[in-house]
Each structure stands twice: as structure tokens, then as C-alpha cells.
Image: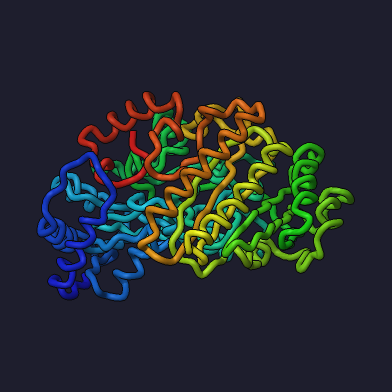
């Protein structure tokens, strides 16, 4: 155990509780938070540790990819074994102290993996084990996909994981997981073989498809049923891949729109994927297109419409790891606060693409007019294969596998904490406007489900889970009758 300056801890807490997101539960006073930290420190084994502010490891533990997701906690806890996770959950259930579970820290919704109470950092669950006979990969809940791909580099195997750097394994899998390989294998949750789960009562359980209810709930249901410490995923052969990115400022955006529409309609090769991003910052507009082919060279014609437009700065065949680590210049912004939102669509039609460009340009200009010159408005287009939901059995997410909804991502980033409310309001406005544009285009998406890893906080849980909510609520009550996991943030049933 490491314990530093409890008085400083109390000072941090007084601010953190005031800043904490709304909750339906009544929590004890902040002194009880510190008491719970001390109780945990006395109960866990030497494989785990507790850290207090302002220690360096505490600061690392509570930090997130987006600073706006970080909340000052009473302490951070790094469990090192499932048994210690079980002990921590028993203490939290007994004391009713709010807590958070952080895997990679990429969540952009405040309070979803942060808390003024006890912050559980899964960083010690950091092993990757490859089974070449079973063709599976086991990975700890504290890893990022960068860590996993480094471990798999040179093995000839890969998994259906994250597309960009810095994304955590745990939230990505438990929420769904859209991958460069989704067209071939489905969502990442469709490739899960098993979960190692610590239930709220402290029971440690390996969950497989034979456990019908928990198997259904964990695949998309996030942290509602306990704390997952390890995942086993199916592995697939991996050789060199081809790809790169191209950037264009303002001109020829109409041609890029047309190329995206044609790619979606004409390209049937499931190894080919694109991720176009429309950006505006300080009223300067640009479009970036990431191109990926799961092989050393794409067949003729697949990316020709893009190659005819862009002066390509980087396209090459390389390892999957090198391709992932190639920088995306505009998304790797120095702006450190940010939220995601999402608009589900059935297709990227010319009308919707025009609306998306208009929103990018409108909010770039509007935010600059408001004096927010360092605010990034960014819109991702994600044209997956229409069969993307056909690879898996029913799961918490998606609530309806019969409709191939595409999870358009919106990302606003900024630097000044005083602008949080204004930028969040702008993000809600643009989300509503784009959904309305899709409906006006004739797409039946007025009440379509949204991807939980992109959806902006404050939405009803039905927005993510649709008609699955009653079943998920029953599963939650069965495994967590005292609602211990309700003490943590997230999408709650």
C-alpha cells in the first residue's frame, strides 16, 4: 500500500464531489470515502495497491485520454488478482461508496470510468497470452489495443480490435467494438470466446456461451454485471496490410463525398475499409481519409476514386502494428478535453453527406465566432459492410441485428474547462440536426439505437439498448440484487 497526505486527499475530494455527475443514489460523506480506501488497503493482497493524491501513480491511475473525463477520486486502487477485485467489490457493496472501473481510459463521458469515490484502475491486468493451437488470444482488462498488437506482432495471428491508438480493450469489447476487420468477422464482441468475471458478490466466474443470460448481457452491457478481468478472443491469421491516410483542405470535398458514396455502394471486398473524417478548427475545414486493406496489396479499382482525388502522403504495405501506429495528424490533437456523440444511419447517401459537410463547416464557423478558436469539430463516416451484424448471436448490443446501422461518430475537442457546457450543447445540437437530416433523406432512423461507446451522456438507456432493456434489467437484478454496480457510472439498467 502507498499512502500519501490524507489531508490533500480530502482537499481533492471536496471539489470532486461537487463536480461529480448526477446520480440516483445517495452517497456517504467524503470522510467515508477515505475510510473505504483504508479498509480496502488493509484487505487486499501484496499483488495489489492503493494510492492517494497527490502521488504520481494516483495521477496516472485516474487520468483519461480526454481530461474532461477525469475526476479527482479519494484514492486509486490497482487490483492485481481477481480475488482482490472480489474483496474490493465486497467492501464497496458494504459501504455503498461510489466507485469507477477504468480499463484504458478512453471513455469521453464524465463519470463513466471516473468517480469522487474509489477509482479502480485495471492496469495490473496486463498480460497477453496466445494459444496457437486453439487460435485464441487472452488479454487483461487493463490493456490498450496498442499493447495487444505489440504482443501479437510477428506471431502470424491477430484479433478483431481497435482501429486507432490509445483505445482500451475492456470498454471497447464490453460496448461492442468496430474494427478494421468488422466486415470480415463482425463486432469484436462477436469474437469473444470467454470472459473472466468477478460478480458483485465476489464470485469469480468464467462466462461462456453456455451461460445464456450473462453471455447475452456482457456482450454490449458494459459494467452492469460485475468487473471483467480477462477476455479470450478468437484469433485470425495476419500478414502484411496495405493502407495509409490522405488529407485535403476544403477543395474537392464534393469529390470526396462522391467517392465515399461509390465505395459504400460498389466495393464488396470485405478486406477493404475506409474511415473518412471531416474536421473544422478555427473555421479551417479539411477532410482526412484512412484507407485499409487486410492484405499486402488491394485489388485494382477498390480505392481508385480516392487515389484520383488526393495527393497521397503515405500509402504502403507494412505490418498491422505499423499501420495502427501511423499517426492520424488531425485526430491526434493537443486539445485535451472532448466528448463523442453519434448519429446512426442506414447509408451514407449524397444528401446525408452534404448535410454532414454543412454541419462541419457551420460548427467550425460558429465556434470560431463564439471565440472558441481552439475547438475541433470532427465527424467520422463509418461505411461498414451491410452484413456487419450477421456474425454473432443475440447480445445486449446491438439490440436489433436485422438493420445494418452505421455508427457515425462526432467528436468535439477543446482546451478550456469553462467551455464544457457550451461545447456539449453544441454537440447535442449537431447530433439532433444530423439525425433529422437522415430522417429527411428517407432513412428510418428517428428512433434507431446508438452505439454506447459513442453516445453522449444524458441519453435514456433505451437509446443504446432499445427493447433489450427489460431483459438486461432482469439479468442485472439476478446477479446484483443489491445494485453494487449501480454505484459505478455508465449506461445503467
Q: Where is residue 111 in the image (x, y as percent from the top left)?
A: 33, 51
Up/down of 454 relative to 462, above or below: below
Count the marks.
0
Up/down of 58 relative to 169, above or below: below
Q: Which residue shows up at 48% across the image and 64% down it?
A: 371
The answer to whether residue 155 is left or right of residue 393 is: right
The quarter of the picture where the N terminus appears is bottom left
Q: Which residue shows up at 48% across the image and 48% down it?
A: 427
Q: Nearer the viewer, residue 124 or 224?
A: 224
Q: In which quarter of the image is residue 60?
A: bottom left
The quarter of the picture where the C terminus appears is top left
Q: Which of 29 and 39 is in front in this view?
A: 29
The reply to whether residue 131 is in sight is no
Q: In which quarter of the image is residue 416?
A: bottom left
Q: Position of residue 19 (x, y in %)?
A: 26, 56
Q: Which residue shows up at 79% across the image and 45% down it?
A: 258
The reply to whether residue 435 is in sight is yes
Q: Position of residue 73 (x, y in %)?
A: 25, 61
The answer to whether residue 312 is left or right of residue 21 is: right
Amino acid at each position: 500500500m502507498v499512502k500519501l497526505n490524507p489531508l490533500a486527499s480530502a482537499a481533492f475530494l471536496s471539489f470532486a464531489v461537487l463536480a461529480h455527475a448526477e446520480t440516483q443514489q445517495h452517497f456517504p460523506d467524503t470522510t467515508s470515502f477515505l475510510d473505504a480506501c483504508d479498509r480496502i488497503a488493509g484487505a487486499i493482497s501484496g499483488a495489489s495497491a492503493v494510492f492517494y493524491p497527490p502521488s504520481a501513480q494516483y495521477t496516472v491511475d485516474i487520468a483519461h485520454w480526454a481530461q474532461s473525463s477525469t475526476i479527482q477520486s479519494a484514492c486509486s486502487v490497482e487490483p492485481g488478482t481477481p480475488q482482490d477485485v472480489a474483496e474490493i467489490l465486497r467492501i464497496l457493496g458494504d459501504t455503498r461508496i461510489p466507485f469507477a472501473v477504468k480499463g484504458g481510459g478512453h471513455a469521453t463521458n464524465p463519470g463513466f470510468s471516473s468517480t469522487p469515490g474509489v477509482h479502480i484502475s485495471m492496469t495490473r491486468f496486463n498480460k497477453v497470452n496466445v494459444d496457437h493451437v486453439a487460435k485464441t488470444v487472452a488479454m487483461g482488462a487493463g490493456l490498450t489495443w496498442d499493447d495487444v498488437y505489440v504482443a501479437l506482432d510477428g506471431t502470424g495471428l491477430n484479433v478483431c480490435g481497435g482501429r486507432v491508438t490509445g483505445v482500451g480493450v475492456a470498454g471497447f469489447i464490453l460496448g461492442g467494438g468496430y474494427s478494421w476487420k468488422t466486415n470480415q468477422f463482425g463486432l469484436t464482441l462477436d469474437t469473444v470466446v470467454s470472459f473472466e468475471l468477478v460478480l458483485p458478490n465476489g464470485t469469480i466466474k468464467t462466462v461462456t456461451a453456455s451461460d445464456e443470460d450473462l453471455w447475452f448481457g456482457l456482450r454490449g452491457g458494459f459494467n452492469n454485471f460485475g468487473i471483467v478481468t480477462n477476455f479470450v478472443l478468437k484469433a485470425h491469421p495476419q500478414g502484411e496490410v496495405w493502407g495509409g491516410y490522405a488529407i485535403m483542405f476544403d477543395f474537392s470535398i464534393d469529390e470526396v463525398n462522391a467517392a465515399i458514396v461509390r465505395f459504400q455502394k460498389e466495393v464488396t471486398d470485405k478486406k477493404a475499409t475506409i474511415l473518412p473524417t471531416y474536421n473544422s478548427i478555427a473555421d479551417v475545414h479539411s477532410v482526412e481519409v484512412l484507407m485499409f486493406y487486410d492484405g499486402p496489396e488491394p485489388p485494382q479499382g477498390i480505392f481508385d476514386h480516392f487515389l484520383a482525388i488526393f495527393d497521397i502522403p503515405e500509402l504502403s504495405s507494412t505490418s498491422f502494428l505499423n499501420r495502427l501506429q501511423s499517426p492520424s495528424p488531425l485526430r491526434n490533437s493537443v486539445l485535451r478535453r472532448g466528448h463523442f456523440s453519434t448519429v446512426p444511419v442506414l447509408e451514407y447517401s449524397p444528401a446525408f453527406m452534404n448535410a454532414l459537410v454543412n454541419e462541419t463547416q457551420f460548427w467550425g464557423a460558429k465556434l470560431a465566432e463564439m471565440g472558441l478558436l481552439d475547438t475541433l469539430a470532427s465527424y467520422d463516416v463509418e461505411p461498414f459492410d451491410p452484413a456487419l451484424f450477421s456474425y454473432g448471436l443475440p447480445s445486449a448490443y446491438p439490440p436489433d441485428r436485422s438493420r445494418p446501422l452505421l455508427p457515425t461518430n462526432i467528436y468535439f475537442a477543446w482546451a478550456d474547462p469553462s467551455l464544457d457546457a457550451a461545447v456539449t450543447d453544441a454537440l447535442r445540437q449537431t447530433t439532433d440536426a444530423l439525425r433529422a437530416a437522415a430522417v429527411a433523406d428517407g432513412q428510418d432512423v428517428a428512433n434507431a439505437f446508438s452505439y454506447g461507446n459513442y453516445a453522449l451522456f444524458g441519453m435514456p438507456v433505451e437509446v443504446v439498448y432499445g427493447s433489450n432493456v427489460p431483459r438486461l434489467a432482469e439479468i442485472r437484478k439476478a446477479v446484483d440484487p443489491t445494485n453494487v454496480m449501480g454505484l459505478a457510472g455508465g449506461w445503467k439498467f
